[in-house]
Amino acid sequence: MNAINYPLEDLVKIKQKRFEQAIYLVEEKKALLKREEDILTKVKKARDKVLKHKEDKLKQLRDALDEGERTDKIMQKKAYLDVVKDDLEVEKKKVQDQQKSVKEAEQELEKARENLKQKQKDIEKLRLHRKQWEKEMKYVEKQQEQLVQDEIGSVKHIMKKKEKKKK
């Protein structure tokens, strides 16, 4: 049996290489997801900073109204508050866009994991096939050995018969 090589050995090597590539891809996708999540955290912090600034300016405007400040100063503060609101909208949009990027990265990671599972199943199928093939080869080898032993036995029997006839 050792003389006979497994006929699907090249396929096993190819599948193993693809499995290793799938592992690498999963690790790569995990790193990408981590980077996207880190970016999301930074963008959220920037948004929160602008939100706090807006709240502070709104409080200042309310205090100015309560104190009865001049109309031109109040109008100036309202105009600035509008600018801050626009900045906040921009930051919120950045957060939404980054959340989409994180979601996409999560989906890519999930696809890579599914691919890895499939590659693992392929390798397992080939391993089981090889095990079955080796079992069959051992059986065939035993059968051939038995045939050789039967022939040797029949040749010995014929030889003994001939020797008995000669006597």
Image: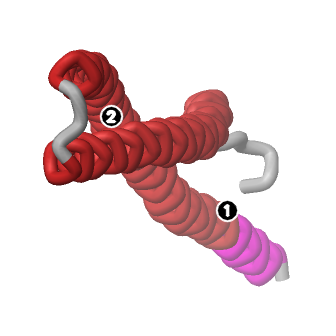
Q: Could you say which quadrant of the image residue 32 lies in?
A: top right
Residue occupying image coordinates x 35% and y 48%: 56
The secondary structure type at the circle numbered 1 is helix
Q: Nearer the viewer, residue 62 or 131?
A: 62
**Looking at the picture, which amino acid does disc 2 mark?**
Val
Q: Would you identify the image quadrant in which residue 68 lies?
A: top left
Residue, x 61% and y 36% (percent of image)? 28
Q: Quadrant of the C terminus?
A: bottom right
Labelled disc at residue 56:
none
**Numbered mark located on residue 148 in the image:** 1
Residue in front for this viewpoint, 40 or 64: 64
Q: Quarter of the image holding residue 61?
A: top left
> Is residue 114 shown left or right of residue 46?
left
* Position of 107 relative to 131 (above/below): above
Crowd around label 2: few <14 · some 14–19 · many ≥20 (10 Å): many
Nearer to us of marks 1 and 2 is 2
Q: Which residues are magenta?
A: 151-166
Side of 2 where 65 appears, left or right: left
Residue 156: x %, y % from top left: 75, 74
Mark sitting on residue 95: 2
Toward the viewer: 50 or 20?
50
Q: Chief secondary structure of the magenta span? A: helix
Q: Position of residue 88 (x, y in %)?
A: 29, 30
Q: Is residue 106 visible?
A: no
Q: Is residue 3 magenta?
A: no
Q: Residue 120: x percent and y percent? A: 47, 52
How are the colours assigned in the image?
A: secondary structure
Crowdedness near tag 1: few (<14), some (14–19) or many (≥20) residues, C-alpha within 10 Å: few
Q: Amino acid at mark 1?
A: Val
Task: State left or right for residue 97 relative to residue 46.
Answer: left
